[in-house]
């Protein structure tokens, strides 16, 4: 295991060196706009380690067959060799024509996996063993003829802020594992990573003005509180009855509450360092949302709120992530 | 990564195929033991997958036992037979510890070598075909080792079907390329390392004759050799005696060869009487050195000289198919039996077969003339003997028992008894073994002689004619000679059926083609490859150029296939629209490059309002397909294309 680990590390080092020193090999490092179509200029095919071992065996077999003047054995070797060579073309065809059309990255908190959805158009060809690798995250997919392919990967996140999605490697060893065909995709995708919330649930700071708790009725009619369903709305927010009446999916907007109004002030936490403050504020934003209490986020130079709801929460978390 | 059950099953199947291909030359118990090990491991993997690989305590003794077993069985661990057991055994043991993808790949790689090794023992078409079948599970295994990415758990049978189709298509596509490589790959002029002779095929004729020794041959239906006649037509059945070995020495039990020095044409003068027969023999590999010739060959075959018995032999056993051309004279005179040879041709062992010897001496006194003595013996055999393959046991004085007690036997007995009688009567006689008969294959225009055509007969020396063939078996069983071995064979009576016979002929032709085109393909045939383009004898440069051209062609074909774009359904719509524009253009309403479909239609309708009915729906449909939908349904696209093809544009004609 340790030997494999060392080998792997040195291989990565070699790759890094090649990228620095051989720009010709890595001319696709520049960001490029979607859609990105894989075609012959950017697909590389190289035998795998197993492919080299198998080729060595074929060589031994052919020398033996020639030496013994054994034509059927030579024929067998030639057939195996031809199958191998053809498998190189099959590997190429698995990638050729695949088109990365969109990348959708959802926000998540640091430390959580970032769900990244890659949308490929794969043409009218059946493609098996299509693999996607980003950094250390990998997944295998199959593309059915004529159907778009959605590949979902979970990227590990560590720090808050904007995460530039690293280069995507689309590769395959289909069908026999003798050849590896690959291509690098480098779309300009950035994902937002929210700060990691503090694990301890410190109580929310007491608000300044004590107002009576009353629920403000949704503005206007029942209808006014509803809006059209958008992708990624939580399922429990769907107003099923209303949806049935209107024949389309409707979502109930969270009721706006007036009551305790929390002020989450960055400068009110002098005892903590920067990241700890951000973590606590993040936690508070989440807690306030949970309690459905309007809150105001005060950061040096900006003030958000008071407000409530997913849009406000996103705005606050974004501000915290980028602070 | 750990193998799932499908991957492991395929690995086990691959190894099983490799073992089965070698089973023909393994001792039975060894094959059974190997199959048992595979089955045990397979069951363990199926029932108790959590056990993982068997413990080293179990694997190590098995690994150590392998060379011991080979040693005990063969007394040697080098050489082809022990080597193959070693290789197959290691493959089976490797399956024993196969748990992850890496192991399985090692199994597949080594299995391909073991499959090839099976071809070192047999090279006939059927074996090659079986080995080809063994490649299928191997490729299936390699394919199964690659995750295919389909998330839905599909039924195993469907996956197998899909993969098999892929593998078969792959093999099919590989055949032309493999054929090109096979044809043009330079062959070695001399082996890189010394190859030991590979005992191939059946034992065939021995170089001696003892009672019952030929019986196995009569049951062997394999071809011994095939003959095509250059000129003239094949000889009549009664003359199809293919001589292999001449036996002189008799010790009371066994007939054996004598010295067999080289032929001295000045001493032994062979004169052909009448036309000669020229024929080409393709001999199947066997364990003997003998070549076969009709009596008597008037010239040496290239590379193979006649000896003083007018037989031909190779220096080593004929372990590869061998082809040679001979000329024989069916009618001839021969001179030059020296006193030493005459003595040898009259010698009988002392103290054996007293009654036969007495009878021979009696004939010598009674008739004197060798011709009449021969006739007397043939008369005796004809009158009172019968032919059977299940001859009764004979005692110490075997020929006495045969001639005076059992009176039943087959060619060996008749030839041996006849020779004893003649020698006792003072007529120089020897025994010849070889093949008699041959089946004329009408479709293939050649004759096939099978092992079951093995035969023994005599040659008698007459001073005015030389050695003359006498077949005592023909006296008791003329149909044996006329019809060939089929006549005495109850066991292969089913060939009597007409279509089975035809089938057998076809099969034989296929085998012959295989031998000629594949097994015997060599450097010389390679040089003749370019005869089609006018190069009679190609040298390496010509062959290299042809090879490069062929490879280039295949590379271009393969790249075209790989790079070619498939046409999507959107293209169907665009092409149909383009076709519509072309048709309109021919009528004088060409679309301006800047014109979109809506503008184009407007202009068309201004010029030809009467065409509204036919044009408007078409353009509406195109706009709908092209701009109103993000994805175009197949059916709608094809429908539009059809509508364009059938559109009636007559309204655009005229004014």
Image (tube, rainbow, N blue to C red):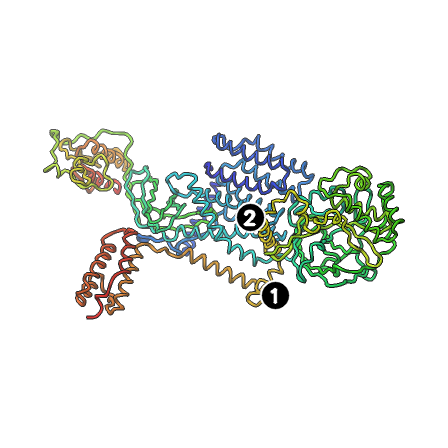
**Circles 1 and 2: CB atoms closer than 8 Å:** no
Q: Residue at x 48, y 44 (%)?
A: B140
Task: Give me the disc on residue B35.
Answer: none
Q: Quadrant of residue B392?
A: top right
Q: Tell me if I can see residue A60 in this picture.
A: no
Compared to residue B591, the image places residue B55 above or below, namely: above
In which quarter of the view is residue A229 placed?
top left
Residue B468 image offset from top left, x and y in percent? 79, 55
Q: Secondary structure at mark 2?
A: helix
Task: Tell me where residue A226 sits by quadrant.
Answer: top left
Q: Which residue is mark 1?
A: B537
Residue placed most toward the observer, A93 or B290: B290
Whole-angstrom CA distance, mark 1 to mark 2, is 32 Å
Nearer the observer, A187 or B519: B519
Task: Say if B229 sits above or below B201 in the image.
Answer: below
Q: Tell us which disc is closer to us: 1 or 2.
A: 2
Residue named by callout 2 = B129
Residue B376 rendering spot, x and y as whole percentages = 82, 49
Q: Residues within 10 Å of mark 2 (few under 14, many from 20)?
A: some
**Mark 1 vs mark 2: which is more N-terminal?**
2
Q: Is residue B298 left or right of residue B635?
A: right
Q: Is residue B388 visible?
A: yes
Indicate the quadrant containing the C terminus of chain A: top left, top right, bottom left or bottom right.
Answer: top left
């Amino acid at each position: 295991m340790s030997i494999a680990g060392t080998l792997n590390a040195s291989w990565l080092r070699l790759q890094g060196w090649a990228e620095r020193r051989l720009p010709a090999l890595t001319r696709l490092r520049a960001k490029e706009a979607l859609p990105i179509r894989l075609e012959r200029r950017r697909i590389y095919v190289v035998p795998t380690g197993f492919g080299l071992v198998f080729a060595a065996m074929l060589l031994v077999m052919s020398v033996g067959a020639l030496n013994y003047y054994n034509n059927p054995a030579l024929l067998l070797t030639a057939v195996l060799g031809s199958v191998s060579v053809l498998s190189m073309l099959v590997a190429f065809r698995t990638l050729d024509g695949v088109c990365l059309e969109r990348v959708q990255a959802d926000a998540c908190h640091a430390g959580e996996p970032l769900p990244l959805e890659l949308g490929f158009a794969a043409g009218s060809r059946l493609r098996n063993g299509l693999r996607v690798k980003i950094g250390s995250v990998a997944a295998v997919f199959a593309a059915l003829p004529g159907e778009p392919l959605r590949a979902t990967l979970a990227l590990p996140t560590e720090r808050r802020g904007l995460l530039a999605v690293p280069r995507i490697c689309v590769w395959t060893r289909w069908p026999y594992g003798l050849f590896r065909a690959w291509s690098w995709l480098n779309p300009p995708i950035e994902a937002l990573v929210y700060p990691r919330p503090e694990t301890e649930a410190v109580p929310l700071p007491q608000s300044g003005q004590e107002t009576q708790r009353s629920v403000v009725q949704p503005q206007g009619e029942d209808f006014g509180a509803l809006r059209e369903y958008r992708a990624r709305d939580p399922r429990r927010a769907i107003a099923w009855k209303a949806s049935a009446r209107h024949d389309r999916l409707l979502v109930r907007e969270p009721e706006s509450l007036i009551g305790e109004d929390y002020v989450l002030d960055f400068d009110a936490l002098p005892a903590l360092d920067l990241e700890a403050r951000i973590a606590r504020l993040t936690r508070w934003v989440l807690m306030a949302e949970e309690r459905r209490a309007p809150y105001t986020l005060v950061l040096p130079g900006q003030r958000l709120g008071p407000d409530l709801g997913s849009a406000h929460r996103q705005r606050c978390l974004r501000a915290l992530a980028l602070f | 990564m750990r193998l799932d059950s499908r991957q492991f099953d395929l690995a086990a199947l691959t190894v099983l195929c490799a073992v089965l291909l070698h089973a023909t030359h393994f001792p039975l118990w060894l094959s059974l033991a190997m199959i048992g090990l595979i089955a045990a491991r397979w069951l363990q993997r199926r029932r108790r997958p959590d056990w993982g690989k068997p413990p080293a305590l179990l694997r190590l003794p098995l690994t150590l036992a392998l060379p011991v077993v080979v040693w005990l069985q063969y007394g040697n661990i080098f050489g082809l037979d022990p080597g193959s057991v070693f290789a197959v055994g290691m493959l089976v043991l490797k399956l024993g510890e196969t748990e992850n993808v890496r192991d399985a790949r090692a199994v597949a790689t080594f299995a391909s070598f073991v499959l090839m090794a099976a071809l070192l023992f047999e090279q006939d078409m059927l074996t090659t075909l079986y080995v080809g079948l063994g490649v299928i599970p191997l490729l299936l295994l390699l394919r199964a080792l690659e995750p295919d990415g389909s998330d839905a758990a599909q039924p195993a049978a469907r996956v197998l079907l899909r993969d098999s189709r892929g593998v078969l298509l792959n093999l099919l596509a590989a055949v032309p390329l493999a054929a090109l490589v096979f044809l043009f790959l330079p062959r070695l002029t001399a082996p890189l390392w010394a190859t030991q002779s590979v005992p191939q095929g059946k034992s065939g004729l021995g170089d001696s004759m003892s009672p019952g020794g030929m019986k196995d041959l009569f049951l062997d239906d394999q071809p011994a050799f095939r003959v095509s006649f250059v000129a003239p037509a094949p000889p009549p059945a009664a003359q199809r005696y293919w001589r292999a070995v001449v036996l002189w020495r008799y010790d009371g039990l066994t007939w054996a060869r004598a010295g067999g020095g080289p032929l001295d044409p000045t001493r032994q003068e062979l004169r052909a009487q009448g036309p000669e027969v020229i024929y080409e023999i393709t001999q199947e590999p066997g364990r003997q050195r003998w070549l076969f010739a009709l009596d008597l060959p008037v010239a040496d075959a290239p590379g193979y000289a006649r000896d003083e018995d007018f037989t031909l032999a190779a220096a080593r056993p004929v372990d590869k198919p061998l082809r040679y051309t001979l000329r024989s004279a069916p009618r001839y005179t021969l001179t030059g039996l020296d006193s030493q040879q005459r003595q040898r041709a009259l010698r009988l062992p002392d103290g054996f077969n007293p009654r036969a010897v007495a009878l021979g001496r009696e004939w010598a006194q009674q008739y004197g003339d060798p011709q009449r003595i021969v006739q007397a013996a043939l008369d005796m055999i004809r009158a009172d003997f019968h032919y059977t393959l299940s001859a009764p046991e004979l005692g110490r004085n075997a020929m006495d028992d045969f001639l005076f007690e059992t009176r039943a036997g087959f060619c060996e007995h008749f030839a041996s008894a006849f020779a004893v009688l003649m020698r006792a009567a003072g007529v120089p006689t020897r025994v010849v073994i070889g093949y008699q008969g041959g089946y004329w294959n009408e479709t293939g225009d050649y004759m096939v002689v099978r092992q079951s055509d093995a035969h023994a007969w005599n040659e008698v020396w007459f001073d005015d004619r030389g050695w003359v063939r006498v077949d005592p078996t023909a006296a008791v069983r003329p149909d044996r000679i006329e019809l060939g071995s089929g006549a005495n064979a109850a066991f292969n009576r089913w060939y009597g059926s007409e279509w089975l016979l035809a089938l057998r002929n076809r099969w034989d032709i296929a085998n012959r083609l295989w031998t000629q085109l594949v097994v015997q393909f060599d450097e010389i045939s390679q040089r003749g490859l370019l005869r089609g383009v006018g190069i009679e004898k190609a040298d390496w440069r010509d062959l290299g150029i042809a090879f490069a051209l062929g490879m280039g062609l295949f590379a271009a074909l393969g790249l075209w296939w790989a790079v070619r774009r498939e046409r999507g359904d959107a293209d169907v719509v665009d092409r149909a629209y383009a076709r519509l524009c072309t048709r309109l253009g021919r009528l004088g309403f060409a679309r301006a490059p800047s014109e979109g479909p809506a503008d184009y239609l407007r202009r068309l309708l201004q010029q030809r309002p009467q065409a509204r009915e036919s044009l408007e729906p078409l353009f509406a449909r195109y706009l709908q397909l092209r701009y109103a939908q993000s994805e175009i349904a197949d059916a709608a696209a094809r429908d539009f294309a059809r509508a364009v093809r059938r559109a009636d544009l007559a309204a655009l004609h005229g004014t």
